[in-house]
Image (cartoon, rainbow, N blue to C red):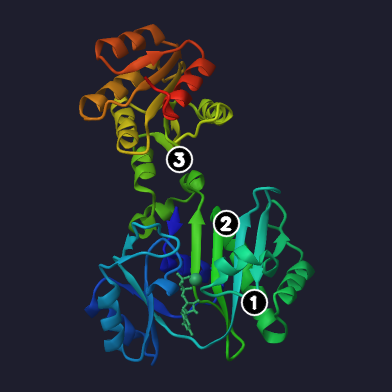
Amino acid sequence: MILSESRSKRLLSEYQVGIPAGATAASEAEAIERARDLGCSRFVVKAQISAGGRGLAGGVSFSDSPEAAGKAAAQILGRRLVTEQTGPAGEVVRRVYVEEAVNIRDSLYLGIVIDQQTALPTLLGSAEGGVAFEQEAAVRPEILDRLALAPDCAYDDDAITGFLERIGLDGEPLSNARQLVIGCIQAFRKNDISLLEVNPLAVTDAGQTLAVDAKIVLDGNALFRHPEFEALSDDLWVDTAERTARDNEINLVRLKGNIGVITNGAGLGLATNDMIFDAGGLPANFMDIRTTATSFGIARGVDLLLAESDITVLLLNVHGGGMTVCDTVVEGLAFAYSRSKRRLPIVARLAGQNAPWARTILKDRRLPHEHFDTMSAAVSRAVSIASGRYR
Ligand code: GDP
Ligand code: MN
């Protein structure tokens, strides 16, 4: 779940991270008004989309008067912005952020991620922040410095100082940046953030440090601990399919493959996806039907998979038991097929409570399916269909 730039900055400012003054607007008139309220003489108008790379794609523009800021907003609003990070479809700009433009002396990069190898929250920093940072870091990884934090984000003061020195700071900017970094670390920990980026972290002519751009990705699985973010849902760019699934008691994570996976229980879901990989296939998603899901909710989950044109087969791996019984899942599947034109082949492995009954439903509703008694047989069949060996 990605927070908009404006929301990311507002959150960081609660942790004493300096940000330029700014406000969002959805029309030219609103942009003019926001700019007037700022009472400064130079403005930046920035497209609020979930992807970065806006600067190079015409999504960031500077103006010298509130009226000019309004014109800039009118040009960006409603446009489909294609950046290096949006993919070819781009993203439509529904809101802009109108900010006071600051004089940037140096542009640095600051990030906090959970390092996949060490599983530790890790600071990333570079003296070479700015719009070209990603491309630069891809070819010259040595421009990126790292500092691992403790699992609970505890840090060593001297280590932070050393890290900031290595990315070229000293004197007053260093002590300002230290406060900014510590604020970011606290925000990262308290809000279950999985990615936090400040790029550029600007050092101004006066030696202040400001988060001129910020991006926060929240850990969707921890959202239940943060009801405060639910209220901001219109400001969150949530994958709409994942969100629809969540509203229907299904945990869905979209992946890049072509095998649609329907399972109950997170453990079974992970194991199924591992088996698909081991058999040489690629899952299109992870799915965990929660015990509280109804057959109608499950139908909505299947709708989402049927709507994905990349998916060429559905793998149904269900172990009935506890509160989810096999027939509930298959009823949902049958309902989704009854209102869809797609007849995607289904490879099923049904076991546990009400499995025989569920198989009867698959037959009676004439769903295009094959059933296998073992997970490995079902997985290998799904993989062979997905790789085009289906007859
Ligand atoms: P991104 O391209 O999507 O990452 O958008 P950014 O918010 O990072 O803006 C792109 C670039 O515009 C930044 O790297 C800065 O160089 C520049 N920029 C943004 N805001 C300001 C500002 O207030 N003052 C100055 N001088 N440059 C800015
Ligand atoms: Mn940026």
Q: Quadrant of residue 260?
A: top left
Closest to the observer, 254 or 110: 254
Disc with the residue nearer the chain's start (2 vs 3): 2
Q: Which residue is mark 2?
A: 190
Disc with the residue nearer the chain's start (3 vs 1): 1
Q: Horizontal and vertical percent for residue 237?
A: 38, 56
Q: CA distance from mark 2 to mark 3?
A: 24 Å
Q: Is residue 315 left or right of 179 when viewed as pictured?
A: left
Instruction: Give the crowd class for mark 3: few <14, some 14-19, many >=20 residues within 10 Å.
Output: some
Q: Which residue is mark 1?
A: 177
Q: Secondary structure at mark 1?
A: helix
Q: Amino acid at mark 2?
A: Lys
Q: Amino acid at mark 1?
A: Ala
Q: Amino acid at mark 3?
A: Val
Q: Which residue is mark 3?
A: 253
Q: Secondary structure at mark 2?
A: helix
